[in-house]
Image: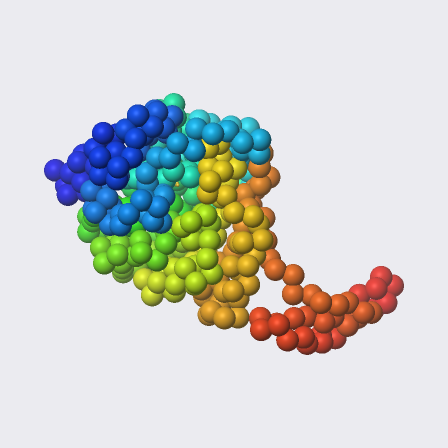
Amino acid sequence: MEKWKKILRDALHDPAELAERFQLSADELRKVGKVFPFRIPRPVLERIGSPGDPLFLQCVPDGRELTASGDLLDDPLGEVRFGKEECIVQKYPDRCLFLVSGECAMYCRFCTRKRKFRAPFRVGKKQIDEGLAYIRAHKELRDVLISGGDPFLLDDDRIEYILKGVRAAEHIRIIRIGTRTPAMLPERITVRLVRMLKKYHPLYVNVHFNHPAELTGPAIKALNRLAEAGIPLGSQTVLLKGVNDDPEVMRELMWKLLEARVKPYYIFQCDLIYGTEHFRTPLSKGIEIVKALRGWSSGMANPHFVIDLPRGGGKVPLVPDYLVKAEGRFRTYCNYCGEEYLYPDLDDTPGKD
Ligand SMILES: *Cc1c(COP(=O)(O)O)cnc(C)c1O
Ligand code: SF4
């Protein structure tokens, strides 16, 4: 058995054991775990310092997950409405999501797709073939984003079947895979997996890291292995109260990602998913973080801060407003340190050219 499979097999999912380790209520863990399962690989468990630390908050079920709030939804992104086949979500003209796996190495308590995991979400060969047929039939698609769950929880052969199937559609120019394994199960990034992946270039991998402490030695090694196969790496981070809602933490995370050859791509406002109220931050927090990054850190360390709009509106970037004053064709902007500068625009009044 490959090492990563052993780690998964031995992962912690027993409420009694988790309760004992952190002096929690086993009953509560059991109740919450029924609604949204938990799974914590042992190497991740070993890195949790104490209850309430950033890793703990992300991995360990919390009674508040059972609390409804007026704003929160079951399917916040309208993926049911936009679901074409069972495992395809197409909201944009030229790209789609292809959800190929219902499993993750660790079930993040704030996950957008909780709804799917609640009714155990099984993706069989039949669903994959339907998804591949959709992709072949839709000539407007140029970019397929393979996600889940986590596609890297599938066997190499199944992943290769999917990649081969997508590549067989000649209109598909790039393939992207979204995975959290480099952070939560870096052992999954084997030499064999990477050797297979690189046959399907141009292939991009988007990883998910929320805290600088997630960039452990093994995680960096896994990222380097992917980079050395010529795979451009991007990252996604979810803005989470108590985990990374702090400009200093985010700055360090973005820098550590860059050092590991990952280009920070998105910071997401936490989606309005049922039972995640305790992770929510006001939009002003994200704006504050973006402001603290822009100018103060290399442009390479500046991801887009986006909301994925409820009901399938798609992603919109939120940017701080740097405009101070507009007078005729003159604009006054405030730079990253708060100093004002005048920019003479061209006059674009209609009729004048
Ligand atoms: C996020 C997302 C994509 C990819 O969006 P990019 O901005 O191109 O990274 C595609 N389809 C859906 C449904 C998405 O949610
Ligand atoms: S890795 Fe992604 S899909 Fe899996 S539980 Fe975490 S957020 Fe959800």
For residue 273, say whether it is visible. Answer: yes
Residue at 18 percent of width and 34 percent of height: 9
Tell me the quadrant of the picture where the N terminus can be found.
top left
Residue at 47 percent of width and 61 percent of height: 247
Figure coloring: rainbow
Spot occupied by residue 266 in the image (x, y as percentages of width and height): 47, 53
For this rendering, which residue is in front, 330 or 338?
A: 338
For this rendering, which residue is in front, 128 or 60?
A: 60
Tell me the quadrant of the picture where the C terminus can be found.
bottom right
Spot occupied by residue 291 in the image (x, y as percentages of width and height): 55, 63
For this rendering, which residue is in front, 145 or 122?
A: 122
User: Taking 79 as reference, is 256 left or right?
Assistant: left
Task: Point out the residue furthest to the right here.
Answer: 351
Taking 133 as reference, is 105 above or below it? below
For residue 203, say whether it is visible. Answer: no
Taking 267 as reference, is 19 above or below it? above
Residue at 57 percent of width and 34 percent of height: 71
Q: Quadrant of residue 165?
A: top left
